[in-house]
Amino acid sequence: MWVAKIKFSGKGTLIGSKAVKHKVNLFGFPLSYYYEKKWIIVQIAVTIFGNEKNKKEFIRDLKKEKRTSNLELKNDFLIGIIKEPIYIKCIYNKDIIHIDPAFISDKGYELINVGSFDRKRLMDIVKLMEERYKGRLLSIQQKKIKSISIMRVHPELTEKQKKAMELAIKHGYYHSPRKIDLKQLTKLAGLSFSTYQVHLRKAEEKLIPYFFEE
């Protein structure tokens, strides 16, 4: 199977634009889809990272959109239905497999990892993203897939790892230059330096392909 990792601007997408606006990061996976006139109806599962205020404002804003329906939120896990424009059907069709959840960044970009037995199908996606969303191909290779992240919409983080990551994101640890250091984060977390560092490092090991891929 051919597998491609593609980066593109999220500022022109429904969820990506709101991620930037409300400073949240998301992992999202399409559960099912079908075509309806000029739209693709996509059922999605999404995990949201960010502070509680920002997450609530993000959800409130998303619910106002005519292109969304049946949004259900439990903690930071969201299931709902969105309408995507029919011109992106090269992403949603029988020849494309979504290998991992899409990563939607509050920095204004999105990452998708998709596969197909037909290399041309992947290059059709690349072409679309280049033309409409300032996209670029990060990698494409032929390999055997050993797993697909369907059962969970983000890498398996423990609650402690997730809280450590959310705290770091919230306070600008991943900004350039950094707005906070590990010692300060440790104090905010109310943990020892070594304990917090372990939780954050393990979370980074699982999330690094998404947060730090350029």
Image (cartoon, grey):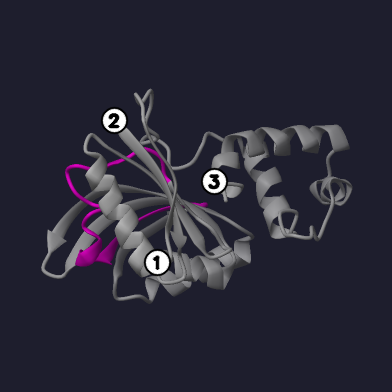
Circle 3: element type = helix
Rendered view: 159 above or below 87: above
Q: Report whether 187 appears left or right of 124.
A: right
Residue type at the position of mark 2: Met
User: What residue lies at 47% left-to-right and 57% top-to-bottom?
Assistant: 110
Q: Which residue is mark 3?
A: 210
Stretch in magenta: 75-101
Q: Which residue is mark 1?
A: 133
Residue type at the position of mark 1: Tyr
Disc 2 or 1, which lies upstream in sequence? Answer: 2
Q: Position of residue 50 (x, y in %)?
A: 61, 58
Q: CA distance from mark 2 to mark 3?
A: 21 Å
- Looking at the image, which is closer to me, 142 or 87? 142
Q: Which residue is mark 2?
A: 1
Q: CA distance from mark 2 to mark 1?
A: 25 Å
Mark 2–mark 1 CB contact (< 8 Å): no
Q: In the rendered image, which quarter is residue 135 located in? A: bottom left
Circle 2: element type = loop
